[in-house]
Image (cartoon, rainbow, N blue to C red):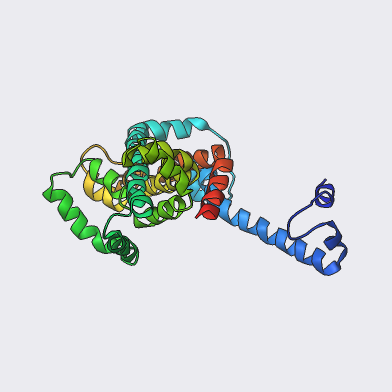
């Protein structure tokens, strides 16, 4: 079956007639083996966590095999109810939703100003945005947290949402994409009486679905896995996210298997998201890269 697919190939680096060369065949086999090894290396930790979650603490400590003695889903259900994970899922979902909206709207608006409106002095502002890419995020954590406290925004999702609305890298992605949109569309919208904000909403956003998808994926992944600032801002508020909850296990009498099950719960949503939107993710990323 694989050989028939190879013979029907009309594009790619290796075609049917290339396989007649022994050197190409050996290289092809080596590449396939390398790819399989990379795949196994990438998925093995997740598979190990999944299978270890079906063990109890005695089996986990004594049994060195990967596979559990039984696949009892009641163990996962018990840990879910004991740790009240539904609450932390809800908190993480709120954080992710707000972060994604802010990432698209605020970064898109700033990039729209740089790429289309180009007000006086925009090059200086854009230079500062590019310069901020050289500053590690952790170096500004102290001043950021201090300002959050001074403004009375601690124990709230709002500062976390706004943080994702000011990402220099995403601004650059939007700007490069907006500059590839034909200017004739913008000029035609101006002739029809559209203002700057209407042009952004009715012209730029609908034509930028691919780059919006890319930024949204980045924002969802970053917001879900974010730990330090949510821990500083939300700790003790009852709004802790999944990642903050995982860290607090160190202060509770929780066994190792329960921690593994909690880790399993934390990686389920991103995995499901990727499985469902795999084609859209890859297509949008490729379109965004080419357009930029």
Q: 173 and 13: which one is in front?
A: 173
Residue 225: give x, y in percent of width and height: 39, 48
**What residue is at 31 percent from the left and 47 percent from the top?**
165
Query: Does the rendering let one see residue 57?
Result: no
Q: Is residue 231 left or right of residue 260?
A: left
Q: Is residue 65 left or right of residue 135?
A: right
Judged from this view, the residue extending furthest toward the bottom is 23
**Toward which corner of the image does residue 101 lie, by quadrant?**
top left
Residue 248: give x, y in percent of width and height: 30, 47
**What residue is at 34 percent from the left and 54 percent from the top?**
114
The N terminus, quarter of image: top right
Judged from this view, the residue extending furthest toward the front is 191
**Toward which corner of the image does residue 252 lie, by quadrant?**
top left
Query: Does the rendering let one see residue 187?
Result: yes
**What residue is at 57 percent from the left and 36 percent from the top?**
70
Q: 286 and 112: which one is in front?
A: 112
Residue 77: give x, y in percent of width and height: 44, 31
Q: How many marks?
A: 0
In the image, residue 41 above or below residue 262: below
Judged from this view, the residue extending furthest toward the right is 20
Q: 148 and 126: which one is in front?
A: 126
């Amino acid at each position: 079956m694989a050989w028939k697919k190879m013979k029907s190939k009309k594009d790619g680096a290796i075609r049917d007639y290339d396989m007649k060369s022994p050197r190409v065949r050996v290289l092809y086999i080596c590449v396939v083996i390398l790819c399989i090894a990379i795949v196994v290396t990438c998925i093995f930790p997740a598979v190990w966590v999944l299978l270890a979650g079906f063990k109890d603490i005695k089996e986990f400590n004594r049994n060195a095999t990967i596979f559990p003695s039984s696949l009892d889903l009641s163990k996962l259900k018990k840990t879910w109810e004991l740790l009240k994970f539904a609450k932390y899922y809800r908190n993480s979902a709120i954080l992710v939703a707000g972060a994604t909206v802010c990432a698209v709207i605020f970064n898109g608006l700033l990039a729209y100003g740089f790429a289309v409106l180009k007000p006086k002095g925009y090059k200086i502002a854009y230079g500062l945005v590019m310069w901020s890419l050289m500053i590690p995020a952790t170096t500004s954590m102290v001043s950021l947290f201090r300002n959050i406290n001074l403004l009375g925004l601690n124990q709230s999702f709002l500062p976390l949402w706004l943080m994702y609305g000011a990402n220099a890298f995403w601004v650059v992605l939007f700007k490069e994409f907006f500059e590839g949109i034909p200017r004739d569309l913008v000029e035609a919208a101006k002739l029809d009486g559209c203002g700057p904000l209407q042009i952004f909403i009715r012209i730029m956003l609908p034509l930028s679905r691919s780059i919006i998808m890319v930024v949204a994926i980045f924002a969802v992944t970053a917001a879900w896995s974010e730990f330090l600032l949510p821990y500083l801002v939300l700790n003790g508020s009852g709004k802790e996210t999944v990642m903050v909850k995982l860290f607090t296990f160190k202060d509770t009498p929780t066994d190792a298997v329960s921690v593994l099950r909690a880790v399993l719960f934390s990686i389920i949503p991103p995995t499901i998201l990727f499985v469902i939107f795999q084609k859209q993710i890859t297509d949008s990323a490729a379109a965004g890269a080419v357009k930029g």
